[in-house]
Amino acid sequence: MIKQRFLSRRRFVGGTLATAAMPFLLPGRVWSATGEAAPNARLNLGFIGVGTQGRHLLRSFLPHPTVQVVAVNDVDTTRRLHHKKLVEDFYSAKQDRDFRGCAEYKDFRELIARKDIDAVVIATPDHWHAYPAVAAARAGKDIYCEKPLSLTIHEARAMVNAVRENQRVFQTGSMQRSDSAFWKGCMVVRNGLIGEVQEVYVSVGGPSKWCDLPEEPMEPGLDWDFWLGPAPQRPYNSVLSPRGVHEHFPNWRNYREYSGGMMTDWGAHHFDIAQWGLGMDESGPVEILPPNGRDVKRLTYKYANGVLMYHGGLEGYNFGVVFVGTKGKVCVDRGRFQTEPESLMNEKFDALPVQLYRSTNHYKDFLDCVRSRKKPICDVEVGARSVTVCHLGNLAYWHDRKLRWDPAKEQFIGDVEANTWLDREKRGPWKV
């Protein structure tokens, strides 16, 4: 079998926009009378949340010659000021003169209220995705928002509705769709080259748990209440929000108040690819069965067409996603693409009858769509459907019960109690 070299997460996410000379274009709003951006207009960006992933995104968008970052937001003062300086140092070096044009805000609502900001990039913890995204859409901003799209199924649909009602461009940060290995894998599947798909195996970690961290002393500079936002009140712990500038990905993602664990964190990547390969970007499974130790050995999703999708890898295949068809297999992971039979590796993909959206750079794809007003490769509806698959799996795990799902109505069938799980109570004014 032929295998392409594995890429680490750092290298994968580092394959971003190429650094270019920075021509400082005339500022101003970019929309013309037709609703399209002028080709030489500068796009003013604001960043909401500048932790580890936010810093990566900032460094990815900064070099683009028609983008200017004009504002950063974070509830941690040290992070906020650090990234303001990062932006201003970058532009100072490009202009060969002192630049002091990046504002900093503790409250993202002040950033969104600025009329001169065309688009926002959201990289907050998961429980803080929905409200800023909906507010930004209503304020006429285009949006790049990190995956997983939402904390709940209701939030995901609220985000879609706000984007559609306000005719915004929205890119979900499930950037594997812009990687050639995943595109090729889904092209093979969607063109029927492995026959009819029967099973899909998705290798990601498990669900989150309720937070049980002890209280730690609070240091100045972090607005802890604002960090919690819509989540329940609880004492500070540095596992949830490490102080200042750090290089790791904090473990708030392990706790239900803020995230869905690896089911949503990595699931928003790999279940997303499974959905793409199955042609389910506007639908989803109809039944979810938790493992019961008897006939159901692992979490199982059933689709209306009979396809079964399993949470967990296929024995003997160390891959993120494996599609099993009547005539072969497709295995895809970051930087890896493998098929059975091997000959499918050598297909002329551009000549296949079914052609999937092709993007080679997730960030550039977003910027291009801001100008063209087309839907990007991981539009808000795609992000919503993929994270809903993740949420359905978590709900089946957490409540240890079989669920029947109507993907058209986005309601559980014949289960009044389960339909109360579509959303959660929100603290303060942070309802969507």
Image (spheres, helix red, strand yellow):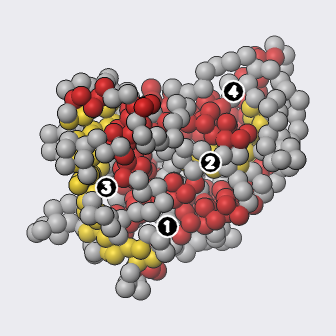
In three-dimensional space, the C-alpha distance between marks 3 and 4, rounded to whole angstroms, equals 37 Å
Residue 1 x %, y %? 19, 26
Residue 386 x %, y %? 45, 56
Give the residue pinned by disc 2: 375
In three-dimensional space, the C-alpha distance between marks 1 and 2, rounded to whole angstroms, equals 21 Å
Give the residue pinned by disc 3: 206
Residue 327 x %, y %? 19, 44
Comparing labels 3 and 4, the label whose residue is closer to the camera: 4
Whether residue 395 is visible to the viewer of this picture, yes or no, is yes
Mark 4 surroundings within 10 Å by alpha-carbon count, few (fewer than 14), some (14 through 19), many (20 or more) = many
| Mark closest to the chain's N terminus, 3 or 1 | 1
In three-dimensional space, the C-alpha distance between marks 2 and 4, rounded to whole angstroms, equals 20 Å
- Verify CB contact (< 8 Å) between mark 1 and mark 2: no
Give me the disc on residue 64. Answer: 4
Residue at the (10%, 69%) spot, across then down: 294
Residue at the (86%, 43%) spot, across then down: 32
User: Is 429 drawn above or below residue 71 in the view shown?
Assistant: below
Residue at the (47%, 63%) spot, across then down: 257
In three-dimensional space, the C-alpha distance between marks 2 and 3, rounded to whole angstroms, equals 31 Å
Give the residue pinned by disc 1: 153
Residue at the (31%, 45%) spot, across then down: 192
| Mark closest to the chain's N terminus, 2 or 4 | 4
Dot 2: element: loop
